Image (spheres, rainbow, N blue to C red):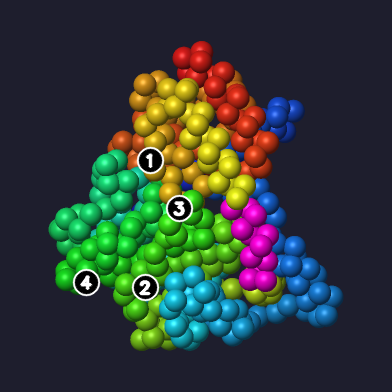
Amino acid sequence: MQTSRRGRVDPFIVMDVLAAAAAAEAAGRRIVHMEIGQPGTPAPAAARAALARAMAEGPLGYTQALGLPALRARIAGLYADRHGIALDPARVVVTAGASGAFVLAFTALFDAGARIGLAMPGYPSYRQILTALSLAPVGIPAAAECGYQPVPADLEAPGLAGMILASPANPTGTILPRDRLAALLGAARDRGIAVVSDEIYHGLHYGAPAVSALEIDPGAIVVNSFSKYFSMTGWRLGWLVVPEGMVRTIERLQQNLFICPPHASQVAALAAFEAIDELEANRAVYAENRRLLLDALPRMGLARIAPPDGAFYIYADVSAFTSDSRALAAAILDSAGVAATPGLDFDPDRGGRMLRLSYAGATADIREGIDRLARFFARGG
């Protein structure tokens, strides 16, 4: 049967790597996972306990389409706590993961055929979600000297209706300082370009915290998630902050596309806000893992690295060893038993010479992965 053009999206290569790693594990091999952006810790204990209580008390059915009011209010409170912003909870929409938030935002903002800019390298699912929605992703090559982040001149690309910004970014971990973020938002406003700010790695920083677009533009559209800082990837829960005038549009879309976000995940997420000490302890583990990698990788010949200001990734130049990062990642998995993500996932044009390593796992695993990688690269790759 013929499939639609919308359905002809590229694979998410990191998931293919994960599947190959799982097959190796099923065959009895010990694999160190440095491919996927998944915390090695479970959801906070308080979140799991709250869900157990809720399940014992009765069924968890549909919630309001926009999410539990108490959770929306608590998310709004996060912006007061982190950013000093008084955010109306009515502008908060709880979603089925950040992925659901992107689907809702892109559908509400753009008509079919609209051109949406995104920095390359960038999160690959941006491109594929846009394609599946009959939108046109416009990859904008970002320079290493700019932290692989866009600059205002990039918004001069012909016919842009929208722009996706990400800080901290995936795969690089780079953060846009306030002045650069403000310049990008100002340039977009001057050109009538709608901006969607991906802030799902907020809370994971190793110097100055990331700035929210809402600090600069109170009417900004922001995507965030419980997956990363809150260590709740498989719970599939995120949120959107949208202008007041968009709320009803988003609500109608949510009612029809998703009905509502998962009730069980919302119960757990609300309790997760009471576990900040546990979450900050997780961040301290990532900081140590990052330190270990930044110390070890240059000794392996991987000295050109995007500044990993946040998130939990290293994006390293491997051009001294290969121009085919997909083949290199396969060789590392096969020979060293380390799963890593080829840069081609994030930049089809330049990613052949780049490799992404996640340091979201346990420190013991990261140490083992470093030892294995060191032996691999000592042999010449």
Distance CA(mark 4)–CA(mark 2):
15 Å
Are the two marked residues, 1 and 4, in contact with CB atoms closer than 8 angstroms? no
Stretch of the chain drawn in magenta:
272-283
Task: Give the structural element (helix, strand or loop) at label 2.
Answer: helix
Task: Give the structural element (helix, strand or loop) at label 3.
Answer: loop
Judge whether residue 280 is colored magenta. Answer: yes
**Magenta stretch, main secondary structure class:** helix
Distance CA(mark 3)–CA(mark 2):
18 Å
Residue type marked 1? Ala
Eye-nearest disc, 3 or 2: 3
Work out whether mark 1 precedes mark 2 in sequence or the reverse, and give the earlier one: 2
As drawn, the label of residue 215 is 2
Residue matched to label 1? 306
Eye-nearest disc, 3 or 1: 3
Residue type marked 2? Glu
Eye-nearest disc, 4 or 2: 2
As drawn, the label of residue 189 is 4
Task: Give the structural element (helix, strand or loop) at label 4.
Answer: helix
Does the rendering let one see residue 114?
no
